[in-house]
Image (spheres, helix red, strand yellow):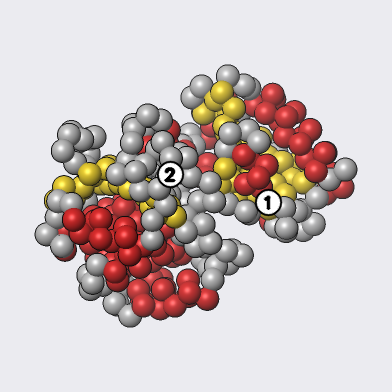
Amino acid sequence: MTENKITKTEAAAFLRAQDEYLILTHRSPDADTIGSAAALVRILRALGKTAAAYCPDPIPRRLEFLTAGAVFAPALPDTAGKTLVSVDVASGAMTGLGEETVFALSIDHHKVNTVRCERLCIEPDYVATGEIILELADELEVPLTQETALPLYAAISSDSGGFRYAATRPETHLFAARLLETGIDFAEINRRLFETKTPAQLSIERLAYSRIELYCGGRFALLAVDQEDLERTGAGESDIDGLNQLPRQIEGVRVSAVIRPKPGCVKVSLRSNDETDVAQLAERFGGGGHFHAAGFSLEGKSVPDAKRLVLDVMEELFA
């Protein structure tokens, strides 16, 4: 299906015109997809619409504070008669509904979006999908409340790395200021996002520090964990996400990779600290993401297989 890119004004007009919505997030949920979905549900309900969100994977405990008000359905609702909208989803497979599902609207900020949709509202220069949702609220003339501002602030703060990542724009800070004006407890939000860790997360991070390897003259850092590591530490998906930032923190590292097993595949998460476009690297293997943060999955491969492949790519890059 040919993508039909639309403006935020057109997206708002479409949202105003329909009545029943089901908002879909991506698998392995983060604060941007959960926060954007929760805020959009509240915005649509403020317009008198029927709306609910659904996440295909369990929502991590540290993000459950974003779901207050029964905005998320505990199980996938019947989609018949509902307008399907995806938020912060780069591919159809990430929704859990399958690649063939056609969404009425996809709202996203990823550089590459392959979701089958009738309308695509995409802003690849935005640091978070939450920024787009805030602008849609303005287009729909829905006043900001604390209930809507809280998940939006979490979405923006999370995907900007606490406003530290290069994709952060001046407008990002202006959006955050507007959200703070509602009186939300931004310090508590940031504490939950960046400073709260489970015992399992601490265990896997302790192990990870001893596993980081440097290659290419210290310009590339690699961390690989296997299934035995996960079982020994009891680390779940949300515990592992925090590993992605560890290798890139080493002085002199330009690109880092974290390799970990998932059911039926191996996931490779890439990060860069310089002008290297890791999204372009990920696209070579059917993945995608952002300039400084991207990833891909290798089906039927082992962690050692993925490690050899990634090392070959990095040796080529830094040759």
Q: Earlier in the sequence, mark 1 or mark 2?
A: 2
User: Quick one: SS at disc 1?
Assistant: loop
Residue 232: quadrant of the picture: top right
The residue mark sitting in front, 1 or 2, is: 2
Residue displayed at 72% across by 53% down: 276
Q: Residue 32, can we see it?
A: no
Q: Given the image, on which type of amino acid does mark 1 rest?
A: Asp
116 above or below 176? Answer: above
- Crowd band around label 2 with a 10 angstrom C-alpha radius: few (<14), some (14–19), many (20+): some
Q: Position of residue 111 (x, y in %)?
A: 54, 51
Left or right: 55 with respect to 268?
A: left
Q: Is residue 125 left or right of residue 26?
A: right
Which residue is labeled 2 in the image? 3
| Residue 121 rendering spot, x and y as whole percentages | 39, 54
- Residue at 24% across, 67% down: 140
Residue 165 position by quadrant: bottom right
Rendered image: mark on residue 277: 1
